[in-house]
Image (spheres, rainbow, N blue to C red):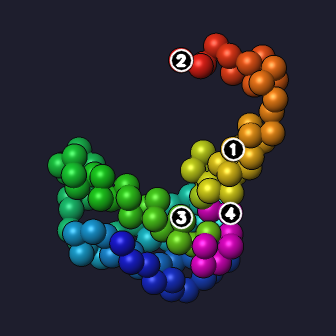
Amino acid sequence: MKGIVGDEDTNGVGLRVIDNNDVSHGIHVAFDGEITYHEQGGYPDKAANRTAEGNEHVEQARRFAQYYVYVDRRYDTVPSTDHPERINAVRLAIRELNDTEFEALFGDLQT
């Protein structure tokens, strides 16, 4: 995937994303990460009319756009469940737990 940041307006950032099939996507990412505009010409517009692979490419382009704006412009556009710094913070917090604390919090999840 490739990204090129375009204009920024009062609502967010526009960019061009080239997906792994070389399809060009015009995407606008709001400052909170919401995708407010997405156009492309390589797949059907309606998700129901796309193949599973086509849907995956469209979704990957949207997620890549959020991440690219986060990296390039430092706006918090990545969902918290995918945010690399937040995931690392959780990893570091878990690493600091002693065995008793870990067992109390996560014992029922261990296999």
Who's the residue at 65% across and 48% down the image?
A: 87
Tell me the number on the disc at residue 111: 2
Viewer-nearest of discs 1 and 3: 1
Q: Residues within 10 Å of mark 1 (few under 14, many from 20)?
A: few
Q: Quadrant of residue 30?
A: bottom right
Q: Who comes first in sequence, dot 1 or dot 3?
A: 3
* Region of the chain picked out in magenta, as a range: 71-77
Q: Who comes first in sequence, dot 2 or dot 1?
A: 1
Circle 3 sits in a helix, a strand or a loop, which is it? helix
Q: Are marks 1 and 3 in contact (CB under 8 Å)?
A: no
Question: Is 97 contained in the magenta span?
Answer: no
Above or below, 109 against 52 in this view is above
Return the residue at label 4: 76
Return the residue at label 1: 91
| Residue 56 screen position, x and y as percent | 30, 52
Circle 1 sits in a helix, a strand or a loop, which is it? helix
Q: What is the spatial separation of the Cα atoms under label 1 and label 3, in whole angstroms?
A: 22 Å
Q: Quadrant of residue 25?
A: bottom left
Tell me the number on the disc at residue 66: 3
Is 23 on the left or on the right of 105, as rendered?
Answer: left
Tell me the number on the disc at residue 16: none
Circle 2 sits in a helix, a strand or a loop, which is it? loop
Q: Amino acid at mark 3?
A: Gln
| Residue 31 screen position, x and y as percent | 65, 66
Q: Who comes first in sequence, dot 4 or dot 2?
A: 4
The answer to whether residue 46 shows anywhere in this view is no
Viewer-nearest of discs 1 and 4: 1
Q: Amino acid at mark 2?
A: Thr
Above or below, 11 against 62 in this view is below
